[in-house]
Image (cartoon, rainbow, N blue to C red):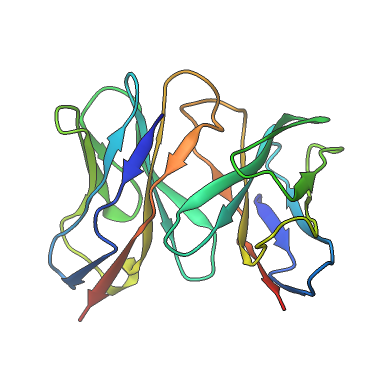
Amino acid sequence: DGGITQSPKYLFRKEGQNVTLSCEQNLNHDAMYWYRQDPGQGLRLIYYSQIVNDFQKGDIAEGYSVSREKKESFPLTVTSAQKNPTAFYLCASMPSDTVTGELFFGEGSRLTVL
Amino acid sequence: AQSVAQPEDQVNVAEGNPLTVKCTYSVSGNPYLFWYVQYPNRGLQFLLKYITGDNLVKGSYGFEAEFNKSQTSFHLKKPSALVSDSALYFCAVRRPTGTASKLTFGTGTRLQVTL
């Protein structure tokens, strides 16, 4: 079955450590997105990529980095510069970056900073 | 700037009763509107969208939504609620220009359906 796989589902980090969240899709989608979800705040866009080898900052990119070396993969690194990284992180994709399209989401990764 | 308001943090309804989850929006031009559902510790799932045409949009799991341009609303409805409908519901809006990344989500409404 096609879908988006995020790993790990749960991750604990000590302050000062970088962590990388994996996002893999086998839907053959060009566009991929990373969102952060905090209670009571809805979803906020961190980074997005419309095509391989290209990505753009979203609304809250500070303290995060991404790469898009393969169409299937869009990993997110939460760096030590991110002041409040504890959150639920969601990866999503679309066939292409069109305004009428709906997002397909992964199951999410919950990051907790100890 | 575009925005979405979901005025109710939680909606409680008895199984078998109709449900409404409210959403109002603010956007320049004609809006593209979406509803997503999230079950606990899971990703979001697409329910339905309004792009153009009929103001009443039908979606997955028996849900529907009515687009009202004069009231800038896009309320989610279901004629008969099920306990399994209990989840967090998000409304989202895009402008017709720009990119798909310019999608603004509401803060979510938790639906609790009881027996």
| A7 on left or right of A40 | right
Q: Residue furthest right?
A: A69
Quadrant hosting residue A19: bottom right
**How far from the left and from the top, in percent, is residue B88?**
38, 62
Q: In this view, does B75 lie above or below B49?
A: below
Residue A70 in sight here:
yes
**How far from the left and from the top, in percent, is residue B107?**
39, 54
**How far from the left and from the top, in percent, is residue B111?**
29, 66
Residue at position x 26%, y 46% in the image: B23
Question: Quarter of the image containing the N terminus of chain B?
Answer: top left
Quadrant hosting residue A37: bottom right
Observer-nearest of A22 and B70: B70
Observer-nearest of B106 and B63: B106
| A8 on left or right of B72 | right
Observer-nearest of B42 and A85: A85
Observer-nearest of A98 and B79: A98
Residue at position x 72%, y 79% in the image: A114
**How far from the left and from the top, in percent, is residue B67?**
22, 34
Q: Is residue B109 above or below residue B13?
A: above
